[in-house]
Image (tube, rainbow, N blue to C red):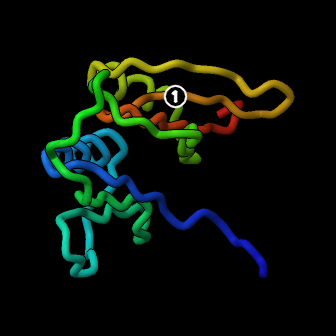
Amino acid sequence: MELQFIDHFTLSVRPHELELLREFYTNTFGLEEGRRPDFPFPGHWLYLNGRPVVHLAANLPDDIDPPDGTMATGKFNHVSFRCKGLEATRQRLNEMGLKFREAPVPGFPWHQIFVHDPIGLKIELTFDVPE
């Protein structure tokens, strides 16, 4: 076996969260909606450079709501996208009113921005520095 790269990540969501998340990932990160298999539940496949990298699957019941109003992600911590345009990204996130945190990576020529999607998943944006 030879691993090549991470292909995609899938978010299992409740039907009422589907459009909110589709809008977040397309508007915030510029992903484009594309072809999706005819699964027996609603969803969207969101593409980056011709590859479906985010799968939204509305396969959780709408009537289940955790007491604190959040969906647990268990031990899963975050997803990372390699990016270009650090200043433009800061500006875009600020214009959208999104809170984010920044951090240099000690000992590596990288800079990270962390932002959360509408259901609480942490997204890391990693930039080469200097850029």
Position above or below: 52 against 130: below
Residue 99 horizontal/vertical position (percent): 38, 18
The residue under label 1 is 114
Q: Secondary structure at mark 1?
A: strand
18 or 27, nearer to the observer: 18
Q: Quadrant of residue 129?
A: top right
Q: Is residue 83 visible?
A: no
> In the image, what residue type sits under mark 1?
Phe
Q: Quadrant of residue 102?
A: top right
42 or 116, nearer to the observer: 42
Residue 81 horizontal/vertical position (percent): 54, 47
Residue 114 horizontal/vertical position (percent): 52, 28
Q: Quadrant of the C terminus?
A: top right
At horizontal 78% and vertical 81% (from top left) the residue drawn is 1
Q: Quadrant of residue 124?
A: top right
> Left of 46 or right of it: where is 17?
left
Position above or below: 32 against 94: below
> Left of 58 or right of it: where is 47?
right
> Left of 72 or right of it: where is 28?
left
Residue that lies at the very extreme toward the right in this rendered image: 107
Callout 1 crowding tier (Cα within 10 Å): few <14, some 14–19, many ≥20: some
At horizontal 19% and vertical 76% (from top left) the residue drawn is 40
At horizontal 25% and vertical 54% (from top left) the residue drawn is 60
